[in-house]
Amino acid sequence: MASVVNQDNLDLFWRFIYERHNVWHKRFVLEQPKPWTNDPVIANYRFTNVYRELDKGTIFLLDEVVPVDGTEPRYSVADMIFRIMVYRTFNHIPTWELLDEQGTRVTYSGWHLSWALSVVSAMAAEKERIFTNAHIVSPYSSMLGETKAEKVCHFLDILHGHLPGIVEQIQSKESLEKVFNYVKSLYGFGPFLAYELVVDFMYRNLIPFTEDDWANAGPGAMRGANLIYPYRRDYLNIMRELRDSQWQEFSRLFLPFIEIAYEGRTPDGHLTLRNIEHCLCEFQKYHRGHTGTGRPRNEFRSTSQGDAFWTRRLRG
């Protein structure tokens, strides 16, 4: 009983991955006009990319938050870890650009609480958006400050004050899971945000692990896995099995998946364990729309100007 698979949902999972990534390929590589798909759910609702590093927020992180000059990082290890934490906590590019004035403010030596508070207060006064809804951020209820943004600034200031010790702890852990558990133990970082952070750390080799070493199955990924294996709850094993069978599955379903190898991290462009976790989360949203049992939360919107901008960023 435990190994029973819902074959229809397994097939749908791989078809969803193929079609979602095919939309990206048509849109940004081939630069074709809409429509990019005949699937009404994918056409009308927003789903994150199959490869996380193709998402706008991650492209910006690599280009602007932790950039490299040639092969050398522009910032120190401590600065990069702190910059990633600040960026992902707000997770909103306009907020970051104001906080990190000319790339000097969000560093160990450049950070000042008064500056951060002045930025978010000015944004609030202009009724500008400070956070996105992509990440679930703690309300930081015990922090000083009247608004959520002010409380977040105080929380980040505490992190800044303990940054040398935090960096030492992060870099001393023997496994990716242990890094995740440590980051999750810091006040203000729940499981979702902690996992986002450790993945970002790996992009710049701040920790010596890969996306295939381990993955944290979030609630959405668990729901997606349950659609495929209704009687199993060994989520890490499920994700590993899906990762290991991907080429066989694409071949079985006659899906010419167009892989992408990003900065040599996956030489054959395979979907990593982290990609599989993310795809399971998106799949359960897609499944609701596909079966008519619900619908994804965000509708898809694009502009030709925005498409052109991100196409240039993707191509460097």
Image (cartoon, helix red, strand yellow):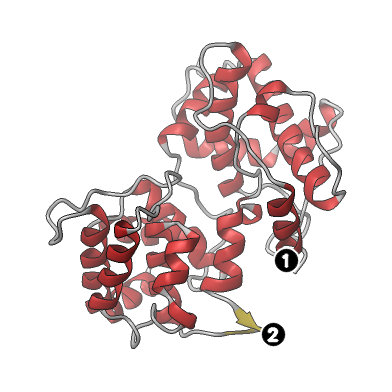
Image location of residue 130, percent across then percent down: 38, 56
**Where on the picture, by quarter, is residue 266?**
bottom right
Question: Can the viewer see residue 176?
Answer: no
Dot 1 falls on a residue whose secondary structure is loop
Among the two numbered marks 1 and 2 on one chain, the one whose residue lies closer to the N terminus: 2
In the rendered view, does 166 fall on the left or right side of 131? left
Dot 2 falls on a residue whose secondary structure is loop
Image location of residue 34, percent across then percent down: 81, 36
- For the residue pair 127 and 254, the one nearer the viewer reads as 127
- The residue drawn where x is 32% and y is 72% is 169
- The residue drawn where x is 62% and y is 35% is 300
**Where on the picture, by quarter, is residue 14?**
top right
In the rendered view, does 86 fall on the left or right side of 147? right
Residue that numbered label 1 is attached to = 264
Which numbered circle lies on residue 161? none
Quadrant for the C terminus in the image: bottom right
Which numbered circle lies on residue 70? 2
Query: With respect to residue 20, does 28 lie above or below?
Result: below
Image location of residue 308, percent across then percent down: 76, 56
**Where on the picture, by quarter, is residue 63?**
bottom right
Number of callouts in the render?
Answer: 2
Tell me the crowding category of disc 2: few under 14, some 14 to 19, or many 20 or more residues within 10 angstroms, Cα based: few
Camera-nearest label, 1 or 2: 2
Measured Cα–Cα span from mark 1 to mark 2 = 15 Å
Image location of residue 257, percent across then percent down: 81, 40
Q: What amino acid type should be assigned to the residue bearing mark 1?
A: Gly
Furthest residue to the front?
126
Q: What amino acid type should be assigned to the residue bearing mark 2?
A: Gly
Query: With respect to residue 226, does 94 lie above or below?
Result: below
